[in-house]
């Protein structure tokens, strides 16, 4: 069926649209992890999010409202090109609001934007880069490329691997990369990860609210691309129990002071602030307030222990890693390795600036 869809759709997607455009509204649903979308026709191409009208959806079907008061508002937030429909068609990332115009429970963008627009934060110019790990599954629930009912060989050959015996799902990865570039997402790169059928893409560097906007849209594009290949994407932070790596969303972070000569002092100062608020950050780093990360942050498989804060140069078992070249240059950025693969980047980046720039306790 996936093959028939790709063959037959081409001739329809090249049809003239009569000057009108399709705008796909995209939002985060009640799981705080997966996404939903629907499309409407606009009479002309929107140039910015505010050119698109607000809309509503049935929140009782997405875990975001009750049936007796089901309408949830979609408020335009960020606009991207549509790599699936092409032309002047768009993808529109939206905020979700309740009937009384308060942010929906899974709308963390509002609090993040509040933090990012404070003068002290704006003046610090916080840059973020998030390394999004994910795992590909077959529709029967088995990990893509793994022997049915069995396991592949131990970890080792798969990280940045090449060859049919070492990589599974590269077609999805490459298609997603191009889709992000076309859409205008700030994708920085990709690589195969340690567990077979696990991959990573990086988004950034992005300043302020852009990090959350671009990572969420990159996730949507990944789900949508995988749909074309009849493959399932999982952001589970520990998709396979046992001696297999989990999946994270490591956050690379810097301020203007950290990036300048002698910035290592500001990096070390930020690490000490992060140390004092370890429980708060753990609560912000996965959708279940730390429950998902408990399965991943065990102190094994290149992770720190969830209960203990640690830091070190080139230490992949630490909460915060200072890359080797940053220690040598004495300026640059730090890497927070605690966020889970299914984290909300709005919450991760908000927590980072509230702790390190706004000095919240």
Image: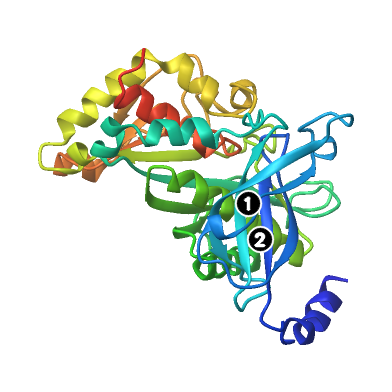
Q: Which residue is mark 1?
A: 196
Give coordinates of residue 119: x percent, y percent. Answer: 28, 33
Q: Is residue 77 left or right of residue 274?
A: right
Q: Is residue 76 left or right of residue 186?
A: right
Query: Looking at the image, which residue is at 73% across and 32% down?
Result: 99
Give coordinates of residue 170: x percent, y percent. Answer: 61, 65
| Nearer-the-camera pick, 118 or 355 | 118
Q: Quadrant of residue 314?
A: top left
Quadrant where the image shows the N terminus: bottom right
Query: Looking at the image, which residue is at 14% across and 43% down?
Result: 260
Q: Residues within 10 Å of mark 2 (few under 14, many from 20)?
A: many
Query: Looking at the image, which residue is at 73% across and 34% down?
Result: 30
Query: Of the residues under marks 2 and 1, which one precedes in the sequence?
Result: 2
Q: Secondary structure at mark 2?
A: loop
Q: Is residue 204 left or right of residue 171?
A: left
Q: Residue furthest left?
A: 261
Q: Which residue is mark 2?
A: 168
Q: Which mark is residue 110?
A: none
Q: Secondary structure at mark 1?
A: loop
| Nearer-the-camera pick, 227 or 243 | 227
Q: As displayed, is residue 213 above or below residue 230?
A: above
Decide: marks 2, 1 in contact (CB < 8 A)? yes
| Nearer-the-camera pick, 38 or 347 | 38
Q: Residues within 10 Å of mark 1 (few under 14, many from 20)?
A: many
Q: Quadrant of residue 255?
A: top left
């Amino acid at each position: 069926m996936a093959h028939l869809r790709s063959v037959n759709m081409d001739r329809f997607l090249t049809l003239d649209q009569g000057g009108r455009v399709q705008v796909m509204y995209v939002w985060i649903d009640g799981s705080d992890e997966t996404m939903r979308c629907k499309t409407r026709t606009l009479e002309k191409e929107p140039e910015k999010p505010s050119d698109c009208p607000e809309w509503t959806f049935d929140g009782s079907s997405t875990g975001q409202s009750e049936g007796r008061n089901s309408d949830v508002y979609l408020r335009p937030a960020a606009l991207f090109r549509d790599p699936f429909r092409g032309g002047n068609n768009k993808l529109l990332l939206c905020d979700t609001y309740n009937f009384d115009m308060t942010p929906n429970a899974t709308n963390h963008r509002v609090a993040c934007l509040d933090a990012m627009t404070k003068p002290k934060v704006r003046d610090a110019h916080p840059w973020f880069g998030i390394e999004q790990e994910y795992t590909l599954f077959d529709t029967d629930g088995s990990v893509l490329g793994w022997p049915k009912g069995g396991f592949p060989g131990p970890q080792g050959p798969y990280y940045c691997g090449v060859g049919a015996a070492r990589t599974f799902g590269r077609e999805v990865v490459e298609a997603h990369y191009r889709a992000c570039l076309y859409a205008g997402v700030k994708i920085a790169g990709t690589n195969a990860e340690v567990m077979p059928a696990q991959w990573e893409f990086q988004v950034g560097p992005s300043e302020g609210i852009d990090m959350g906007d671009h990572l969420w849209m990159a996730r949507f594009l990944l789900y949508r691309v995988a749909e074309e290949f009849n493959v399932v994407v999982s952001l589970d932070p520990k998709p396979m129990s046992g001696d297999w790596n989990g999946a994270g969303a490591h956050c690379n972070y810097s301020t203007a002071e950290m990036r300048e000569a002698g910035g290592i002092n500001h990096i070390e100062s930020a690490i000490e602030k992060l140390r004092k608020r370890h429980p708060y950050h753990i609560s912000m780093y996965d959708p279940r307030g730390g429950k998902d990360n408990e399965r991943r942050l065990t102190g094994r498989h290149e992770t720190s222990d969830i209960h203990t804060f640690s830091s070190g140069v080139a230490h992949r078992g630490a909460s915060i890693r200072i890359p080797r070249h940053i220690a040598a240059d004495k300026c640059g950025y730090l890497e927070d390795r605690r966020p889970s693969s299914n984290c909300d980047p709005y919450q991760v980046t908000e927590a980072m600036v509230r702790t390190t720039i706004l000095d919240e306790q």
